[in-house]
Amino acid sequence: MPGGEPVSLLDATVDAVRGLDEEAAAAARDRQSRMTKPPGSLGMLETVSEQLAGLSGQCPPPMPEPAALAVFAADHGVHAQGVTPWPQEVTAQMVSNFLAGGAVVNAFAKQVGAEVCVVDVGVAAHLGDAAGLVPRKVRMGTADMTQGPAMSREEAVAAIEAGIETARDLVAAGNRCLLTGDMGIANTTASAALIAAFTGASPAQVTGYGTGIDEQTYAHKVEIVRRALQLHRPDPQDPVGVLAAFGGLEHAALAGFILGGAALRVPVVLDGVIAGAAALVAQAIAPESTAACVAGHRSAEPGHALALEALGIHPLIDLELRLGEGSGAVLALPLVAAAVRALREVATFDSAGVADASASVVSPTERERH
Ligand SMILES: Cc1cc2ncn([C@H]3O[C@H](COP(=O)(O)O)[C@@H](O)[C@H]3O)c2cc1C
Ligand SMILES: O=C(O)c1cccnc1
Protein backbone atom coordinates (compact mmCIF):
# COMPACT_ATOMS: atom_id res chain seq x y z
CA MET A 1 0.00 0.00 0.00
CA PRO A 2 1.91 3.10 -1.17
CA GLY A 3 2.42 5.58 1.65
CA GLY A 4 0.39 3.40 4.06
CA GLU A 5 1.59 1.95 7.36
CA PRO A 6 3.55 -1.26 6.78
CA VAL A 7 1.46 -4.21 7.97
CA SER A 8 3.19 -6.08 10.80
CA LEU A 9 3.72 -9.83 10.61
CA LEU A 10 1.36 -10.23 13.57
CA ASP A 11 -1.41 -8.18 11.93
CA ALA A 12 -1.00 -9.97 8.58
CA THR A 13 -1.14 -13.33 10.37
CA VAL A 14 -4.25 -12.41 12.37
CA ASP A 15 -5.92 -11.25 9.14
CA ALA A 16 -5.29 -14.66 7.56
CA VAL A 17 -6.87 -16.66 10.41
CA ARG A 18 -10.31 -18.03 9.48
CA GLY A 19 -12.71 -20.51 11.01
CA LEU A 20 -13.40 -23.99 9.63
CA ASP A 21 -14.67 -24.51 6.07
CA GLU A 22 -18.17 -25.75 6.91
CA GLU A 23 -18.64 -27.54 3.59
CA ALA A 24 -15.53 -29.71 4.02
CA ALA A 25 -16.41 -30.38 7.67
CA ALA A 26 -19.95 -31.42 6.65
CA ALA A 27 -18.55 -33.71 3.93
CA ALA A 28 -16.37 -35.39 6.58
CA ARG A 29 -19.37 -35.75 8.88
CA ASP A 30 -21.36 -37.32 6.06
CA ARG A 31 -18.56 -39.72 5.16
CA GLN A 32 -18.16 -40.74 8.81
CA SER A 33 -21.86 -41.68 8.82
CA ARG A 34 -21.37 -43.88 5.72
CA MET A 35 -18.17 -45.63 6.84
CA THR A 36 -18.36 -49.36 7.73
CA LYS A 37 -18.86 -48.87 11.44
CA PRO A 38 -21.76 -47.85 13.63
CA PRO A 39 -22.31 -44.08 13.38
CA GLY A 40 -20.40 -42.17 16.07
CA SER A 41 -18.41 -45.23 17.13
CA LEU A 42 -15.05 -43.49 16.67
CA GLY A 43 -16.06 -40.88 19.22
CA MET A 44 -13.65 -37.96 19.45
CA LEU A 45 -11.64 -39.24 16.49
CA GLU A 46 -14.64 -38.45 14.30
CA THR A 47 -14.70 -34.90 15.67
CA VAL A 48 -10.98 -34.51 15.00
CA SER A 49 -11.35 -35.77 11.43
CA GLU A 50 -14.19 -33.30 10.80
CA GLN A 51 -12.14 -30.47 12.31
CA LEU A 52 -9.10 -31.27 10.16
CA ALA A 53 -11.27 -31.50 7.05
CA GLY A 54 -12.73 -28.08 7.88
CA LEU A 55 -9.28 -26.70 8.60
CA SER A 56 -7.74 -27.89 5.33
CA GLY A 57 -10.90 -27.16 3.32
CA GLN A 58 -10.69 -30.70 1.90
CA CYS A 59 -12.45 -33.98 2.58
CA PRO A 60 -10.59 -36.09 3.31
CA PRO A 61 -7.89 -33.80 4.72
CA PRO A 62 -4.19 -34.53 4.14
CA MET A 63 -2.44 -36.83 6.61
CA PRO A 64 -0.84 -34.75 9.42
CA GLU A 65 2.61 -35.88 8.29
CA PRO A 66 5.40 -35.11 8.62
CA ALA A 67 5.00 -33.49 12.03
CA ALA A 68 7.36 -31.13 13.81
CA LEU A 69 7.55 -30.21 17.49
CA ALA A 70 8.83 -26.75 18.44
CA VAL A 71 10.18 -26.49 21.99
CA PHE A 72 10.24 -22.80 22.96
CA ALA A 73 12.64 -22.16 25.85
CA ALA A 74 12.76 -19.13 28.14
CA ASP A 75 13.39 -18.11 31.76
CA HIS A 76 11.18 -16.36 34.29
CA GLY A 77 11.96 -13.52 36.69
CA VAL A 78 9.32 -14.86 39.08
CA HIS A 79 11.72 -17.73 39.76
CA ALA A 80 13.28 -15.37 42.37
CA GLN A 81 10.09 -15.75 44.45
CA GLY A 82 10.80 -19.40 45.25
CA VAL A 83 7.91 -20.97 43.30
CA THR A 84 9.86 -24.04 42.18
CA PRO A 85 12.62 -26.09 43.78
CA TRP A 86 14.66 -26.24 40.56
CA PRO A 87 17.50 -23.81 39.82
CA GLN A 88 16.96 -21.53 36.85
CA GLU A 89 20.06 -22.98 35.12
CA VAL A 90 18.07 -26.16 34.44
CA THR A 91 16.32 -24.37 31.54
CA ALA A 92 19.63 -23.90 29.66
CA GLN A 93 20.84 -27.36 30.67
CA MET A 94 17.66 -28.95 29.34
CA VAL A 95 18.07 -27.02 26.06
CA SER A 96 21.45 -28.77 25.66
CA ASN A 97 19.76 -32.05 26.55
CA PHE A 98 17.05 -31.55 23.85
CA LEU A 99 19.75 -30.75 21.29
CA ALA A 100 21.69 -33.87 22.28
CA GLY A 101 18.50 -35.97 21.94
CA GLY A 102 18.47 -36.99 25.61
CA ALA A 103 15.18 -35.60 26.97
CA VAL A 104 11.90 -37.51 27.41
CA VAL A 105 10.37 -35.64 24.51
CA ASN A 106 13.22 -36.72 22.21
CA ALA A 107 12.44 -40.37 22.97
CA PHE A 108 8.69 -39.84 22.42
CA ALA A 109 9.28 -37.84 19.22
CA LYS A 110 11.48 -40.64 17.88
CA GLN A 111 8.72 -43.12 18.69
CA VAL A 112 6.19 -41.24 16.54
CA GLY A 113 8.57 -39.94 13.87
CA ALA A 114 8.30 -36.23 14.71
CA GLU A 115 11.13 -33.74 14.23
CA VAL A 116 12.22 -31.70 17.29
CA CYS A 117 13.07 -28.02 16.77
CA VAL A 118 14.46 -26.10 19.79
CA VAL A 119 13.96 -22.33 19.84
CA ASP A 120 15.62 -19.99 22.38
CA VAL A 121 13.22 -17.07 22.85
CA GLY A 122 14.51 -15.96 26.22
CA VAL A 123 16.84 -18.28 28.10
CA ALA A 124 18.79 -16.33 30.76
CA ALA A 125 22.14 -17.72 29.62
CA HIS A 126 24.37 -17.25 26.61
CA LEU A 127 23.83 -20.41 24.60
CA GLY A 128 26.28 -19.35 21.88
CA ASP A 129 25.88 -21.12 18.58
CA ALA A 130 24.82 -24.47 19.97
CA ALA A 131 24.39 -26.82 17.01
CA GLY A 132 20.75 -27.15 15.99
CA LEU A 133 19.43 -24.37 18.23
CA VAL A 134 17.20 -21.74 16.62
CA PRO A 135 18.47 -18.46 18.16
CA ARG A 136 15.49 -16.09 18.60
CA LYS A 137 16.32 -14.66 22.03
CA VAL A 138 14.18 -11.58 22.75
CA ARG A 139 15.72 -10.94 26.19
CA MET A 140 17.60 -12.82 28.89
CA GLY A 141 14.50 -14.10 30.65
CA THR A 142 11.55 -12.05 31.89
CA ALA A 143 11.46 -9.70 34.88
CA ASP A 144 9.67 -10.73 38.09
CA MET A 145 5.92 -10.25 37.53
CA THR A 146 5.37 -9.52 41.22
CA GLN A 147 7.57 -6.40 40.95
CA GLY A 148 6.45 -4.99 37.58
CA PRO A 149 5.71 -6.10 34.02
CA ALA A 150 7.52 -9.30 32.99
CA MET A 151 8.45 -7.62 29.68
CA SER A 152 7.53 -4.71 27.43
CA ARG A 153 4.70 -4.87 24.90
CA GLU A 154 7.33 -4.64 22.12
CA GLU A 155 9.15 -7.68 23.52
CA ALA A 156 5.87 -9.60 23.76
CA VAL A 157 5.14 -8.86 20.08
CA ALA A 158 8.72 -9.79 19.08
CA ALA A 159 8.35 -13.17 20.82
CA ILE A 160 4.90 -13.73 19.24
CA GLU A 161 6.44 -13.03 15.83
CA ALA A 162 9.30 -15.46 16.53
CA GLY A 163 6.60 -18.10 17.06
CA ILE A 164 4.77 -17.15 13.86
CA GLU A 165 8.04 -17.41 11.92
CA THR A 166 8.84 -20.79 13.46
CA ALA A 167 5.44 -22.11 12.30
CA ARG A 168 5.95 -20.61 8.85
CA ASP A 169 9.46 -22.12 8.49
CA LEU A 170 8.38 -25.58 9.66
CA VAL A 171 5.43 -25.60 7.25
CA ALA A 172 7.65 -24.28 4.42
CA ALA A 173 9.96 -27.23 5.14
CA GLY A 174 7.05 -29.57 4.35
CA ASN A 175 5.56 -30.26 7.78
CA ARG A 176 1.79 -30.78 7.84
CA CYS A 177 1.29 -30.88 11.60
CA LEU A 178 2.76 -28.66 14.33
CA LEU A 179 3.20 -29.72 17.95
CA THR A 180 3.79 -27.34 20.87
CA GLY A 181 6.59 -27.75 23.40
CA ASP A 182 8.05 -25.63 26.19
CA MET A 183 10.96 -25.43 28.57
CA GLY A 184 11.22 -22.78 31.26
CA ILE A 185 11.75 -23.33 34.95
CA ALA A 186 8.91 -21.56 36.88
CA ASN A 187 6.65 -21.40 33.84
CA THR A 188 3.72 -23.11 35.56
CA THR A 189 3.49 -19.97 37.73
CA ALA A 190 3.28 -17.68 34.69
CA SER A 191 0.78 -20.12 33.12
CA ALA A 192 -1.43 -19.93 36.22
CA ALA A 193 -1.46 -16.11 36.11
CA LEU A 194 -2.29 -16.09 32.38
CA ILE A 195 -5.13 -18.59 32.82
CA ALA A 196 -6.57 -16.61 35.75
CA ALA A 197 -6.36 -13.42 33.67
CA PHE A 198 -8.30 -14.91 30.75
CA THR A 199 -10.80 -17.14 32.58
CA GLY A 200 -11.43 -15.10 35.72
CA ALA A 201 -10.69 -18.18 37.85
CA SER A 202 -9.09 -17.66 41.25
CA PRO A 203 -5.34 -18.13 41.94
CA ALA A 204 -6.09 -21.25 44.01
CA GLN A 205 -8.10 -22.78 41.13
CA VAL A 206 -5.41 -22.28 38.51
CA THR A 207 -2.25 -22.95 40.51
CA GLY A 208 -0.77 -26.42 40.59
CA TYR A 209 2.22 -28.29 41.93
CA GLY A 210 4.30 -27.86 38.75
CA THR A 211 7.39 -30.05 38.83
CA GLY A 212 6.52 -31.03 42.42
CA ILE A 213 6.47 -28.80 45.52
CA ASP A 214 5.50 -29.21 49.17
CA GLU A 215 2.29 -27.77 50.67
CA GLN A 216 4.07 -24.73 52.10
CA THR A 217 5.61 -23.83 48.73
CA TYR A 218 2.25 -24.44 47.08
CA ALA A 219 0.50 -21.95 49.41
CA HIS A 220 3.29 -19.46 48.68
CA LYS A 221 2.92 -20.03 44.89
CA VAL A 222 -0.83 -19.29 45.08
CA GLU A 223 -0.01 -16.10 47.00
CA ILE A 224 2.55 -15.06 44.33
CA VAL A 225 -0.04 -15.54 41.56
CA ARG A 226 -2.57 -13.56 43.62
CA ARG A 227 -0.06 -10.73 44.17
CA ALA A 228 0.83 -10.53 40.48
CA LEU A 229 -2.86 -10.40 39.47
CA GLN A 230 -3.49 -7.68 42.03
CA LEU A 231 -0.51 -5.64 40.82
CA HIS A 232 -1.39 -5.77 37.10
CA ARG A 233 -5.20 -5.94 37.11
CA PRO A 234 -5.09 -7.57 33.67
CA ASP A 235 -7.57 -6.73 30.92
CA PRO A 236 -8.34 -9.92 28.93
CA GLN A 237 -9.33 -7.70 25.98
CA ASP A 238 -5.66 -6.64 25.77
CA PRO A 239 -3.82 -9.95 25.24
CA VAL A 240 -0.46 -8.34 24.46
CA GLY A 241 -0.78 -6.34 27.69
CA VAL A 242 -1.57 -9.54 29.63
CA LEU A 243 1.48 -11.26 28.11
CA ALA A 244 3.67 -8.26 28.95
CA ALA A 245 2.41 -8.33 32.55
CA PHE A 246 3.01 -12.01 33.29
CA GLY A 247 5.16 -13.46 30.53
CA GLY A 248 6.71 -15.67 29.62
CA LEU A 249 8.55 -15.30 26.37
CA GLU A 250 7.78 -18.96 25.55
CA HIS A 251 4.06 -18.35 26.12
CA ALA A 252 4.22 -15.43 23.69
CA ALA A 253 6.12 -17.50 21.11
CA LEU A 254 3.66 -20.39 21.53
CA ALA A 255 0.74 -18.01 20.98
CA GLY A 256 2.45 -16.88 17.76
CA PHE A 257 3.12 -20.50 16.77
CA ILE A 258 -0.61 -21.27 17.14
CA LEU A 259 -1.60 -18.15 15.16
CA GLY A 260 0.97 -19.05 12.48
CA GLY A 261 -0.34 -22.63 12.18
CA ALA A 262 -3.95 -21.38 12.09
CA ALA A 263 -3.13 -18.83 9.36
CA LEU A 264 -1.52 -21.60 7.27
CA ARG A 265 -4.42 -23.95 8.04
CA VAL A 266 -2.13 -26.57 9.54
CA PRO A 267 -3.25 -28.40 12.71
CA VAL A 268 -1.50 -27.47 15.96
CA VAL A 269 -1.48 -30.21 18.60
CA LEU A 270 -1.27 -28.59 22.03
CA ASP A 271 0.68 -30.00 24.96
CA GLY A 272 -0.16 -29.16 28.59
CA VAL A 273 -0.80 -26.16 30.80
CA ILE A 274 1.81 -23.90 29.19
CA ALA A 275 0.31 -24.45 25.73
CA GLY A 276 -3.19 -24.07 27.16
CA ALA A 277 -2.29 -20.66 28.59
CA ALA A 278 -0.69 -19.65 25.27
CA ALA A 279 -3.76 -20.82 23.32
CA LEU A 280 -5.91 -18.49 25.46
CA VAL A 281 -3.61 -15.62 24.40
CA ALA A 282 -3.95 -16.69 20.74
CA GLN A 283 -7.74 -16.97 21.12
CA ALA A 284 -7.91 -13.44 22.59
CA ILE A 285 -5.85 -12.13 19.65
CA ALA A 286 -7.70 -14.11 16.94
CA PRO A 287 -10.76 -16.06 18.20
CA GLU A 288 -10.82 -18.39 15.17
CA SER A 289 -7.26 -19.61 15.89
CA THR A 290 -8.78 -22.26 18.19
CA ALA A 291 -10.15 -23.97 15.05
CA ALA A 292 -6.58 -25.14 14.30
CA CYS A 293 -5.98 -26.49 17.82
CA VAL A 294 -6.20 -30.11 18.92
CA ALA A 295 -5.73 -30.67 22.67
CA GLY A 296 -3.20 -33.52 22.79
CA HIS A 297 -3.81 -34.33 26.43
CA ARG A 298 -4.99 -33.01 29.76
CA SER A 299 -2.18 -32.43 32.22
CA ALA A 300 -2.36 -32.85 35.97
CA GLU A 301 -2.09 -29.05 36.44
CA PRO A 302 -5.56 -27.82 37.52
CA GLY A 303 -5.34 -24.68 35.40
CA HIS A 304 -5.08 -26.78 32.26
CA ALA A 305 -8.62 -28.17 32.50
CA LEU A 306 -9.93 -24.62 33.02
CA ALA A 307 -7.98 -23.39 30.00
CA LEU A 308 -9.33 -26.21 27.81
CA GLU A 309 -12.86 -25.45 28.98
CA ALA A 310 -12.44 -21.79 28.06
CA LEU A 311 -11.01 -22.81 24.68
CA GLY A 312 -13.92 -25.21 24.14
CA ILE A 313 -11.69 -28.14 23.19
CA HIS A 314 -11.47 -31.65 24.60
CA PRO A 315 -8.22 -33.47 25.37
CA LEU A 316 -7.51 -36.69 23.44
CA ILE A 317 -5.75 -38.46 26.31
CA ASP A 318 -5.27 -38.18 30.06
CA LEU A 319 -2.20 -40.03 31.28
CA GLU A 320 -1.73 -37.83 34.37
CA LEU A 321 1.34 -36.36 32.70
CA ARG A 322 2.88 -33.27 34.28
CA LEU A 323 6.06 -32.84 32.32
CA GLY A 324 5.69 -30.32 29.50
CA GLU A 325 8.38 -30.26 26.77
CA GLY A 326 5.64 -31.23 24.30
CA SER A 327 5.46 -34.78 25.67
CA GLY A 328 1.65 -35.01 25.70
CA ALA A 329 1.29 -33.46 22.25
CA VAL A 330 3.76 -35.92 20.76
CA LEU A 331 2.02 -38.92 22.36
CA ALA A 332 -1.33 -37.77 20.91
CA LEU A 333 0.02 -37.43 17.36
CA PRO A 334 -0.70 -41.07 16.34
CA LEU A 335 -4.33 -40.58 17.41
CA VAL A 336 -4.67 -37.48 15.23
CA ALA A 337 -3.09 -39.38 12.34
CA ALA A 338 -5.39 -42.39 12.93
CA ALA A 339 -8.45 -40.09 12.88
CA VAL A 340 -7.46 -38.76 9.44
CA ARG A 341 -6.39 -42.17 8.11
CA ALA A 342 -9.75 -43.69 9.03
CA LEU A 343 -11.56 -40.97 7.09
CA ARG A 344 -9.25 -41.49 4.11
CA GLU A 345 -9.12 -45.28 3.98
CA VAL A 346 -12.12 -46.92 5.61
CA ALA A 347 -14.67 -48.22 3.12
CA THR A 348 -18.26 -46.99 3.05
CA PHE A 349 -21.24 -49.33 3.36
CA ASP A 350 -21.91 -48.75 -0.32
CA SER A 351 -18.39 -49.38 -1.59
CA ALA A 352 -17.85 -52.48 0.55
CA GLY A 353 -21.30 -53.92 0.04
CA VAL A 354 -21.93 -54.06 3.78
CA ALA A 355 -25.49 -53.66 4.90
CA ASP A 356 -26.06 -50.71 7.19
CA ALA A 357 -28.72 -50.50 9.86
CA SER A 358 -31.26 -48.66 7.69
CA ALA A 359 -30.90 -50.69 4.45
CA SER A 360 -30.82 -54.27 5.65
CA VAL A 361 -29.49 -55.81 2.43
CA VAL A 362 -27.46 -54.33 -0.44
CA SER A 363 -28.17 -56.44 -3.52
CA PRO A 364 -25.28 -57.45 -5.80
CA THR A 365 -26.78 -55.42 -8.65
CA GLU A 366 -26.93 -52.35 -6.44
CA ARG A 367 -23.34 -52.99 -5.36
CA GLU A 368 -22.17 -53.10 -8.99
CA ARG A 369 -23.63 -49.69 -9.63
CA HIS A 370 -21.20 -48.10 -7.09
C1 LIG B 1 14.62 -31.68 34.70
C2 LIG B 1 13.36 -31.03 34.20
C3 LIG B 1 12.90 -31.30 32.91
C4 LIG B 1 11.71 -30.70 32.49
N1 LIG B 1 11.06 -30.80 31.32
C5 LIG B 1 9.99 -30.05 31.38
N2 LIG B 1 9.89 -29.45 32.57
C6 LIG B 1 8.76 -28.61 32.94
O1 LIG B 1 8.90 -28.06 34.23
C7 LIG B 1 9.01 -26.66 34.23
C8 LIG B 1 7.85 -26.00 34.89
O2 LIG B 1 7.65 -26.39 36.20
P1 LIG B 1 7.84 -25.39 37.41
O3 LIG B 1 6.92 -24.22 37.16
O4 LIG B 1 7.45 -26.17 38.63
O5 LIG B 1 9.29 -24.97 37.44
C9 LIG B 1 9.11 -26.25 32.78
O6 LIG B 1 10.42 -26.08 32.41
C10 LIG B 1 8.43 -27.39 32.08
O7 LIG B 1 8.69 -27.49 30.73
C11 LIG B 1 10.97 -29.83 33.29
C12 LIG B 1 11.44 -29.53 34.57
C13 LIG B 1 12.63 -30.12 35.03
C14 LIG B 1 13.12 -29.78 36.39
O1 LIG C 1 1.14 -29.30 32.21
C1 LIG C 1 2.33 -29.25 31.90
O2 LIG C 1 2.63 -29.23 30.71
C2 LIG C 1 3.40 -29.16 32.95
C3 LIG C 1 3.18 -29.53 34.25
C4 LIG C 1 4.19 -29.44 35.17
C5 LIG C 1 5.42 -28.96 34.78
N1 LIG C 1 5.63 -28.60 33.54
C6 LIG C 1 4.63 -28.69 32.61
Image (spheres, rainbow, N blue to C red):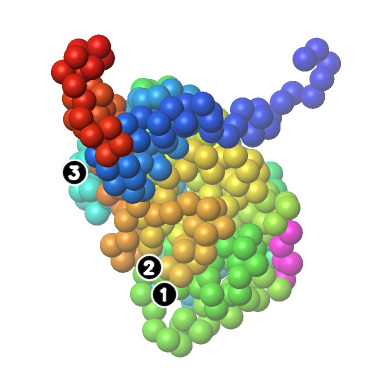
- Circle 3 — which element? helix
Residue 111: which disc?
3
Q: Residue at x 43, y 23 (%)?
A: 58
Residue 46: which disc?
none
Judge: label 2 CB < 8 Å from ligand 2: yes
Principal secondary structure, stretch drawn in magenta: loop
Rendered-image quadrant of the C terminus: top left
Q: Are marks 2 and 3 in contact (CB under 8 Å)?
A: no
**Residue 145 visible in the shown view:** no
Residue 209: which disc?
1
**Quick one: label 2 or label 1, which is nearer the N terminus?**
1
Residue 254 pos. (x, y %): 50, 45
Q: Amino acid at mark 2?
A: Ala
Q: Residue at x 40, y 43 (%)?
A: 47
Q: Which residues are magenta?
A: 231-235
State whether residue 268 is above or below residue 25: below
Q: CA distance from mark 2 to mark 3?
A: 23 Å
**Residue 298 or 361: which is nearer the viewer?**
361
Q: Residue at x 39, y 54 (%)?
A: 315
- Apparent side of residue 116 relative to residue 55 in the rendered image (left or right): left
- Circle 1 — which element? loop
Judging by the rendered image, the residue that carries numbered circle 2 is: 300
- Circle 2 — which element? loop
Q: Amino acid at mark 1?
A: Tyr
